[in-house]
C-alpha cells in the first residue's frame, strides 16, 4: 500500500477487491494503491502490449505509482497528449478491448470525484468522462466533454509547475475556453 490519493491504503491490508472495484478506485479517486494492485495482478507487460496494440506510440509504463526510487533511477511512466487523445477517441468509439468494456470505462470516468480541473468551470449539467493525475509540479486531466451535439476530447498535461494549484486552475480555464468555443459554434 502506498500514499497519495485514494482510500485503499486506509483499509485493512488483507482486504482483497475484484479487479473491477480496483479499477473504479483507480479512476474515480486516483487511488495509487488500487493502481499498484492492478499492476501486481495483470503485470506491466500486458498494459504496455495493449498500449502498443492501440497505437499509443509514446506511452510506456515502467514503474508502480509512488515508486520514487524507480523514478529517480530513470524508470518513469510516460505518455503524450496525442496518445491520451487517441485512447479517449478509441474509448468513445467503443474500440478498447470490446464495446462493453469501453462503455464501462467511460461510465466509470464519468464518476470521477476529482473535479478541480476539466469540470471546474463548466456547467455541472455537462457530463465529463475524465481521468486526472498529479504529482508535485505536475497536473494532468484528460477527458471527453459531452457538449450537446458535439462531444469533444480534451487533454491537458502540465509539467515543471512551481505551484500545482496554478496548474489545476490553468486546466480549468482551458476547458472553459474549449467548452465556450464549441457552444458558440453550434
Image (cartoon, rainbow, N blue to C red):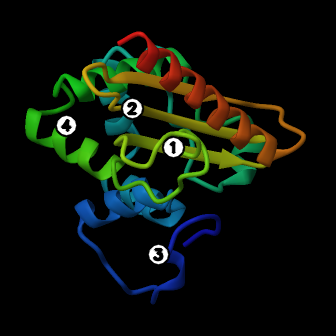
Q: Which residue is under mark 2?
A: 145
Camera-nearest label, 3 or 4: 4
Q: Quadrant of residue 25?
A: bottom left
Q: State whether residue 142 is above or below residue 23.
A: above
Disc 1 packing (10 Å; few <14; some 14–19; many ≥20)? many
Q: Secondary structure at mark 1?
A: loop
Viewer-nearest of discs 2 and 4: 2
Q: Position of residue 183 (x, y in %)?
A: 42, 20
Which residue is tagged 1? Answer: 119
Provide the secondary structure element on which disc 4 rests. Answer: helix
| Placement of the N terminus among the 4 image quadrants | bottom right
Q: Between tags 3 and 1, which lies in front?
A: 1
Left or right relative to 35: residue 68: right
Query: Quick one: label 2 or label 4, which is nearer the N terminus?
Result: 4
Whether the residues at callouts 3 and 2 have beta carbons within 8 Å, the answer is no
In the image, which is nearer the foreground, mark 3 or mark 2?
A: 2
Q: Residue at x 73, y 52 (%)?
A: 68
In front of the other: 89 or 23? 89
**Which of the pair 142/80 is nearer the observer?**
142
Q: Residue furthest right?
A: 162
Residue at disc 3, secondary structure = helix
Instruction: Tell me which residue sits at (49%, 75%) in the image.
Output: 7
The correct choice, above or below, for 79 with respect to 114 in the image is above
Q: Distance from label 4 to label 1 (Cα)?
A: 21 Å
Which residue matches tag 3? 8
What is the total number of numbered labels drawn onto the structure image? 4
Q: Which residue is at the far top?
A: 185
Q: Earlier in the sequence, mark 1 or mark 2?
A: 1
User: How far separated are the C-alphas under marks 3 and 1?
Assistant: 25 Å
Give the camera-side residue of 32 and 162: 162
Image coordinates of residue 177 in percent, x first then y, are 59, 23
- Point out which mark residue 102 bears: 4
Amino acid at each position: 500500500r502506498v500514499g497519495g490519493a485514494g482510500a485503499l491504503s486506509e483499509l485493512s491490508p488483507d482486504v482483497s477487491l475484484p479487479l473491477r472495484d480496483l479499477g473504479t478506485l483507480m479512476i474515480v479517486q486516483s487511488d495509487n494503491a488500487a493502481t499498484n494492485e492492478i499492476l501486481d495482478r495483470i503485470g506491466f507487460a500486458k498494459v504496455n502490449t495493449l498500449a502498443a496494440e492501440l497505437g499509443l506510440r509514446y506511452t510506456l509504463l515502467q514503474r508502480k505509482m509512488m515508486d520514487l526510487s524507480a523514478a529517480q533511477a530513470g524508470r518513469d511512466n510516460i505518455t503524450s497528449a496525442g496518445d491520451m487523445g487517441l485512447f479517449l477517441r478509441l474509448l468513445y468509439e467503443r474500440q478498447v478491448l470490446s464495446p462493453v468494456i469501453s462503455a464501462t470505462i467511460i461510465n466509470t470516468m464519468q464518476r470521477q470525484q476529482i473535479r478541480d480541473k476539466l469540470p471546474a468551470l463548466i456547467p455541472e449539467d455537462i457530463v465529463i468522462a475524465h481521468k486526472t493525475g498529479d504529482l508535485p509540479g505536475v497536473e494532468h486531466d484528460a477527458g471527453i466533454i459531452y457538449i450537446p451535439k458535439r462531444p469533444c476530447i480534451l487533454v491537458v498535461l502540465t509539467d515543471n509547475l512551481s505551484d500545482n494549484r496554478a496548474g489545476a486552475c490553468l486546466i480549468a480555464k482551458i476547458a472553459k475556453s474549449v467548452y465556450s468555443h464549441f457552444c458558440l459554434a453550434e
